[in-house]
Image (cartoon, helix red, strand yellow):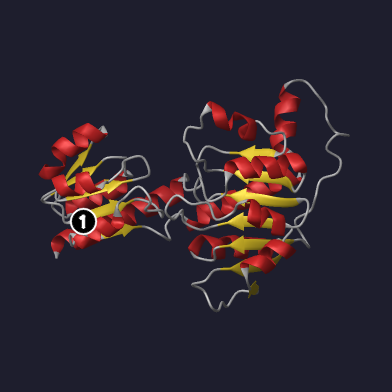
Amino acid sequence: MKVLVSDGIEKIGADMMKKAGLEVVEQKMSPEELLQNIEQYDAIIVRSATKVTKEVIDNGKNLKAIGRGGVGLDNINVEYAKSKGIPVLNTPGASSISVAELAIAHMFAVSRFLNKSNIEMREGKWPKKDYAKGMELTGKTLGLIGFGNIGKEVAKRALGLGMKVIAHDPFVKETTLDVKLTTNDEVYANADYISVHVPLIDGKACVTKNEFNKMKDGVVLINCARGGVICENELLEALNSGKVKYAGIDVFVNEPPTDAQKELINHPRVSITPHIGASTVEAQERVGEEIAQKIIDALKK
Protein backbone atom coordinates (compact mmCIF):
# COMPACT_ATOMS: atom_id res chain seq x y z
CA MET A 1 0.00 0.00 0.00
CA LYS A 2 1.11 3.53 -0.82
CA VAL A 3 1.21 6.56 1.51
CA LEU A 4 1.66 10.15 0.36
CA VAL A 5 3.39 12.43 2.87
CA SER A 6 2.79 15.88 1.46
CA ASP A 7 3.99 18.23 4.21
CA GLY A 8 6.91 16.26 5.62
CA ILE A 9 7.33 13.83 8.51
CA GLU A 10 10.14 13.02 10.92
CA LYS A 11 12.41 10.20 9.74
CA ILE A 12 11.31 7.98 12.62
CA GLY A 13 7.72 8.07 11.34
CA ALA A 14 8.65 7.37 7.73
CA ASP A 15 10.89 4.50 8.82
CA MET A 16 8.09 2.98 10.90
CA MET A 17 5.75 2.90 7.91
CA LYS A 18 8.40 1.46 5.61
CA LYS A 19 9.22 -1.24 8.18
CA ALA A 20 5.51 -2.10 8.25
CA GLY A 21 5.65 -2.74 4.50
CA LEU A 22 4.13 0.52 3.27
CA GLU A 23 5.51 2.46 0.31
CA VAL A 24 6.12 6.00 1.51
CA VAL A 25 6.29 8.88 -0.96
CA GLU A 26 7.41 12.19 0.56
CA GLN A 27 6.48 14.82 -2.00
CA LYS A 28 5.06 18.32 -1.77
CA MET A 29 2.33 18.75 -4.37
CA SER A 30 0.41 21.75 -5.61
CA PRO A 31 -3.40 21.56 -5.29
CA GLU A 32 -3.60 20.69 -8.98
CA GLU A 33 -0.94 17.97 -8.72
CA LEU A 34 -2.66 16.53 -5.67
CA LEU A 35 -5.96 16.24 -7.52
CA GLN A 36 -4.24 14.52 -10.42
CA ASN A 37 -2.20 12.05 -8.37
CA ILE A 38 -4.17 11.24 -5.20
CA GLU A 39 -5.84 8.24 -6.85
CA GLN A 40 -2.50 6.39 -6.63
CA TYR A 41 -2.47 6.47 -2.83
CA ASP A 42 -4.12 4.47 -0.07
CA ALA A 43 -3.44 7.15 2.56
CA ILE A 44 -2.26 10.74 2.81
CA ILE A 45 -0.50 12.46 5.70
CA VAL A 46 -0.61 16.27 5.84
CA ARG A 47 0.34 19.04 8.24
CA SER A 48 -1.25 22.49 7.97
CA ALA A 49 -0.21 23.43 4.41
CA THR A 50 -1.97 20.83 2.27
CA LYS A 51 -5.76 21.05 2.04
CA VAL A 52 -7.70 17.80 1.75
CA THR A 53 -10.87 19.09 0.10
CA LYS A 54 -14.02 17.37 -1.10
CA GLU A 55 -12.48 17.26 -4.59
CA VAL A 56 -9.31 15.61 -3.29
CA ILE A 57 -11.37 13.02 -1.43
CA ASP A 58 -13.51 12.34 -4.51
CA ASN A 59 -10.40 11.86 -6.65
CA GLY A 60 -8.79 9.67 -3.99
CA LYS A 61 -10.73 6.60 -5.00
CA ASN A 62 -8.34 4.32 -3.10
CA LEU A 63 -8.06 6.43 0.05
CA LYS A 64 -8.47 4.41 3.23
CA ALA A 65 -7.11 6.94 5.74
CA ILE A 66 -6.26 10.64 6.05
CA GLY A 67 -3.68 11.62 8.65
CA ARG A 68 -2.93 15.04 10.09
CA GLY A 69 0.38 15.44 11.89
CA GLY A 70 -0.91 17.85 14.51
CA VAL A 71 -4.09 18.82 16.32
CA GLY A 72 -6.31 21.03 14.16
CA LEU A 73 -8.29 19.55 11.30
CA ASP A 74 -9.54 22.74 9.65
CA ASN A 75 -7.58 22.01 6.44
CA ILE A 76 -9.40 18.68 6.00
CA ASN A 77 -13.05 18.21 5.02
CA VAL A 78 -13.59 15.85 7.94
CA GLU A 79 -17.34 15.40 7.61
CA TYR A 80 -17.14 14.55 3.92
CA ALA A 81 -14.31 12.10 4.52
CA LYS A 82 -16.33 10.37 7.23
CA SER A 83 -19.36 10.22 4.94
CA LYS A 84 -17.16 8.26 2.54
CA GLY A 85 -16.06 5.93 5.31
CA ILE A 86 -12.52 7.33 5.40
CA PRO A 87 -11.12 7.80 8.92
CA VAL A 88 -9.41 11.12 9.67
CA LEU A 89 -6.56 10.65 12.14
CA ASN A 90 -4.58 13.26 14.06
CA THR A 91 -2.15 13.57 16.97
CA PRO A 92 -3.92 15.65 19.61
CA GLY A 93 -1.49 15.02 22.45
CA ALA A 94 1.87 14.84 20.72
CA SER A 95 2.62 18.58 20.62
CA SER A 96 0.72 19.68 23.73
CA ILE A 97 3.78 20.31 25.88
CA SER A 98 5.56 22.33 23.19
CA VAL A 99 2.54 24.57 22.51
CA ALA A 100 1.95 25.04 26.24
CA GLU A 101 5.56 26.09 26.80
CA LEU A 102 5.34 28.64 23.99
CA ALA A 103 2.17 30.14 25.48
CA ILE A 104 3.99 30.57 28.79
CA ALA A 105 7.01 32.00 26.94
CA HIS A 106 4.82 34.69 25.37
CA MET A 107 3.49 35.58 28.82
CA PHE A 108 7.04 36.09 30.06
CA ALA A 109 8.04 37.95 26.89
CA VAL A 110 5.42 40.66 27.21
CA SER A 111 5.54 40.82 31.00
CA ARG A 112 9.28 41.52 31.02
CA PHE A 113 9.61 43.31 27.65
CA LEU A 114 11.82 40.60 26.16
CA ASN A 115 10.49 41.21 22.65
CA LYS A 116 11.30 44.92 22.68
CA SER A 117 14.48 45.11 24.75
CA ASN A 118 16.14 42.40 22.67
CA ILE A 119 15.69 44.49 19.52
CA GLU A 120 16.63 47.80 21.11
CA MET A 121 19.83 46.52 22.72
CA ARG A 122 20.95 45.18 19.34
CA GLU A 123 20.48 48.75 18.09
CA GLY A 124 22.90 50.00 20.74
CA LYS A 125 20.27 51.28 23.17
CA TRP A 126 20.15 50.71 26.95
CA PRO A 127 16.41 50.86 27.78
CA LYS A 128 16.76 49.98 31.48
CA LYS A 129 14.51 52.79 32.70
CA ASP A 130 11.92 52.26 29.97
CA TYR A 131 11.39 48.66 31.04
CA ALA A 132 11.64 49.03 34.78
CA LYS A 133 7.96 48.25 35.38
CA GLY A 134 7.64 44.62 34.43
CA MET A 135 5.05 42.25 35.86
CA GLU A 136 5.40 39.00 37.77
CA LEU A 137 3.26 36.05 36.73
CA THR A 138 3.22 34.79 40.32
CA GLY A 139 -0.04 35.70 42.03
CA LYS A 140 -1.84 36.59 38.82
CA THR A 141 -4.97 34.84 37.53
CA LEU A 142 -4.67 32.93 34.28
CA GLY A 143 -7.89 32.28 32.40
CA LEU A 144 -7.96 29.44 29.89
CA ILE A 145 -10.51 29.34 27.09
CA GLY A 146 -10.37 25.67 26.19
CA PHE A 147 -9.16 23.03 28.63
CA GLY A 148 -8.15 20.12 26.43
CA ASN A 149 -4.70 18.56 26.21
CA ILE A 150 -2.87 21.84 25.61
CA GLY A 151 -4.93 23.86 28.07
CA LYS A 152 -4.16 21.34 30.81
CA GLU A 153 -0.42 21.52 30.09
CA VAL A 154 -0.54 25.33 30.25
CA ALA A 155 -2.38 25.07 33.58
CA LYS A 156 0.26 22.75 35.07
CA ARG A 157 3.03 25.18 34.24
CA ALA A 158 1.08 28.22 35.39
CA LEU A 159 0.31 26.55 38.72
CA GLY A 160 4.01 25.80 39.10
CA LEU A 161 4.69 29.52 38.66
CA GLY A 162 2.27 30.37 41.46
CA MET A 163 -0.59 31.57 39.28
CA LYS A 164 -4.25 31.00 40.04
CA VAL A 165 -5.92 29.22 37.13
CA ILE A 166 -9.54 29.35 36.00
CA ALA A 167 -10.85 27.73 32.84
CA HIS A 168 -13.88 27.21 30.64
CA ASP A 169 -14.48 24.25 28.37
CA PRO A 170 -18.01 22.98 27.64
CA PHE A 171 -16.67 19.44 27.26
CA VAL A 172 -14.75 19.31 30.56
CA LYS A 173 -16.80 18.95 33.75
CA GLU A 174 -14.09 18.02 36.28
CA THR A 175 -10.33 18.01 36.75
CA THR A 176 -7.77 16.72 39.22
CA LEU A 177 -5.72 19.91 38.78
CA ASP A 178 -6.11 22.88 41.11
CA VAL A 179 -8.11 24.70 38.46
CA LYS A 180 -11.54 26.27 38.85
CA LEU A 181 -13.82 25.28 35.96
CA THR A 182 -16.26 28.08 35.35
CA THR A 183 -18.10 30.07 32.68
CA ASN A 184 -16.62 32.02 29.80
CA ASP A 185 -17.94 35.23 31.30
CA GLU A 186 -16.22 34.59 34.64
CA VAL A 187 -12.94 33.81 32.90
CA TYR A 188 -13.12 37.06 30.93
CA ALA A 189 -14.14 39.09 33.98
CA ASN A 190 -11.47 37.81 36.38
CA ALA A 191 -8.37 36.82 34.42
CA ASP A 192 -5.23 38.97 34.32
CA TYR A 193 -3.88 36.75 31.54
CA ILE A 194 -6.03 34.85 29.04
CA SER A 195 -4.72 32.04 26.85
CA VAL A 196 -6.97 30.62 24.14
CA HIS A 197 -6.81 26.91 23.27
CA VAL A 198 -9.80 26.11 21.08
CA PRO A 199 -10.19 25.00 17.44
CA LEU A 200 -11.32 27.31 14.66
CA ILE A 201 -14.88 26.27 13.83
CA ASP A 202 -16.44 27.34 10.51
CA GLY A 203 -13.86 30.12 10.26
CA LYS A 204 -15.57 32.08 13.04
CA ALA A 205 -13.71 33.95 15.77
CA CYS A 206 -14.71 33.07 19.33
CA VAL A 207 -13.03 36.16 20.82
CA THR A 208 -14.51 39.33 19.35
CA LYS A 209 -15.47 42.80 20.54
CA ASN A 210 -18.21 41.27 22.68
CA GLU A 211 -15.64 39.22 24.60
CA PHE A 212 -13.12 42.08 24.80
CA ASN A 213 -15.79 44.20 26.48
CA LYS A 214 -16.12 41.56 29.21
CA MET A 215 -12.39 41.47 29.99
CA LYS A 216 -10.56 43.39 32.69
CA ASP A 217 -8.81 46.55 31.53
CA GLY A 218 -5.14 45.84 30.89
CA VAL A 219 -5.54 42.12 30.28
CA VAL A 220 -2.81 40.07 28.56
CA LEU A 221 -4.07 37.88 25.71
CA ILE A 222 -2.25 34.87 24.23
CA ASN A 223 -3.13 32.97 21.06
CA CYS A 224 -1.14 29.82 20.27
CA ALA A 225 -4.23 27.98 19.02
CA ARG A 226 -5.43 28.90 15.52
CA GLY A 227 -5.31 32.07 13.48
CA GLY A 228 -8.79 33.54 13.46
CA VAL A 229 -10.04 32.33 16.84
CA ILE A 230 -9.34 35.88 18.01
CA CYS A 231 -10.58 38.59 15.64
CA GLU A 232 -7.34 40.31 14.61
CA ASN A 233 -8.87 43.68 13.72
CA GLU A 234 -10.74 43.89 17.01
CA LEU A 235 -7.64 42.77 18.92
CA LEU A 236 -5.75 45.65 17.32
CA GLU A 237 -8.49 48.06 18.43
CA ALA A 238 -8.33 46.64 21.96
CA LEU A 239 -4.55 47.07 22.04
CA ASN A 240 -4.78 50.65 20.82
CA SER A 241 -7.46 51.51 23.39
CA GLY A 242 -5.48 49.88 26.21
CA LYS A 243 -8.20 47.32 26.94
CA VAL A 244 -5.62 44.67 26.08
CA LYS A 245 -2.26 45.67 27.54
CA TYR A 246 -0.17 43.04 25.78
CA ALA A 247 -0.70 40.17 23.37
CA GLY A 248 1.35 37.13 22.41
CA ILE A 249 0.52 35.66 19.00
CA ASP A 250 1.85 32.55 17.28
CA VAL A 251 -0.93 32.04 14.71
CA PHE A 252 -2.51 34.33 12.13
CA VAL A 253 -5.47 34.43 9.78
CA ASN A 254 -3.08 34.59 6.83
CA GLU A 255 0.22 32.76 7.06
CA PRO A 256 2.56 34.31 6.11
CA PRO A 257 0.75 37.50 7.15
CA THR A 258 -0.22 40.07 4.54
CA ASP A 259 0.38 43.83 4.52
CA ALA A 260 -3.04 44.27 6.11
CA GLN A 261 -1.72 42.56 9.26
CA LYS A 262 1.47 44.61 9.56
CA GLU A 263 0.07 47.04 12.11
CA LEU A 264 -0.79 44.19 14.48
CA ILE A 265 2.53 42.39 13.94
CA ASN A 266 4.56 45.58 14.45
CA HIS A 267 2.56 46.74 17.46
CA PRO A 268 4.98 47.63 20.28
CA ARG A 269 2.97 45.65 22.84
CA VAL A 270 2.76 42.42 20.88
CA SER A 271 5.11 39.43 21.03
CA ILE A 272 5.00 37.36 17.85
CA THR A 273 6.26 34.02 16.55
CA PRO A 274 5.69 32.39 13.12
CA HIS A 275 3.35 29.48 14.03
CA ILE A 276 6.02 27.47 15.85
CA GLY A 277 3.98 26.15 18.75
CA ALA A 278 4.57 22.52 17.85
CA SER A 279 7.99 23.11 16.33
CA THR A 280 10.29 21.39 18.77
CA VAL A 281 12.45 18.35 18.11
CA GLU A 282 10.65 16.39 20.80
CA ALA A 283 7.15 17.25 19.60
CA GLN A 284 7.91 16.49 15.97
CA GLU A 285 9.28 13.07 16.84
CA ARG A 286 6.17 12.30 18.87
CA VAL A 287 3.95 13.55 16.04
CA GLY A 288 5.81 11.45 13.47
CA GLU A 289 5.62 8.30 15.56
CA GLU A 290 1.98 8.73 16.51
CA ILE A 291 0.59 9.52 13.06
CA ALA A 292 2.72 6.77 11.46
CA GLN A 293 1.35 4.18 13.87
CA LYS A 294 -2.21 5.33 13.32
CA ILE A 295 -1.83 5.09 9.54
CA ILE A 296 -0.24 1.62 9.85
CA ASP A 297 -3.12 0.44 12.03
CA ALA A 298 -5.72 1.90 9.67
CA LEU A 299 -4.21 0.30 6.55
CA LYS A 300 -3.65 -3.07 8.19
CA LYS A 301 -7.31 -3.49 9.12
Q: Amino acid at mark 1?
A: Ala
Q: Nearer the viewer, residue 280 or 183?
A: 183
The residue labelled by disc 1 is: 65
Question: Splitting the image into 4 quarters, where does residue 151 fall?
Answer: bottom right
Residue 109 seen in the current view: no
Instruction: Indicate the position of residue 191 as horizontal and vertical percent values.
Output: 72, 61
Question: In front here: 49 or 26?
Answer: 49
Q: Position of residue 35 (x, y in %)?
A: 18, 38
Q: Residue at x 81, y 45 (%)?
A: 134
Q: Is residue 13 left or right of residue 205?
A: left
Please, what secondary structure does the residue beneath circle 1 have?
strand
Viewer-closest of 6 and 251: 251
Relative placement, left or right, of 249 versus 301 is right
Tell which residue pokes out farthest to the top in this image.
124
Circle 1: is it few (<14), some (14-19), or many (20+) Cα within 10 Å?
A: many
| Quadrant that contains the C terminus | bottom left
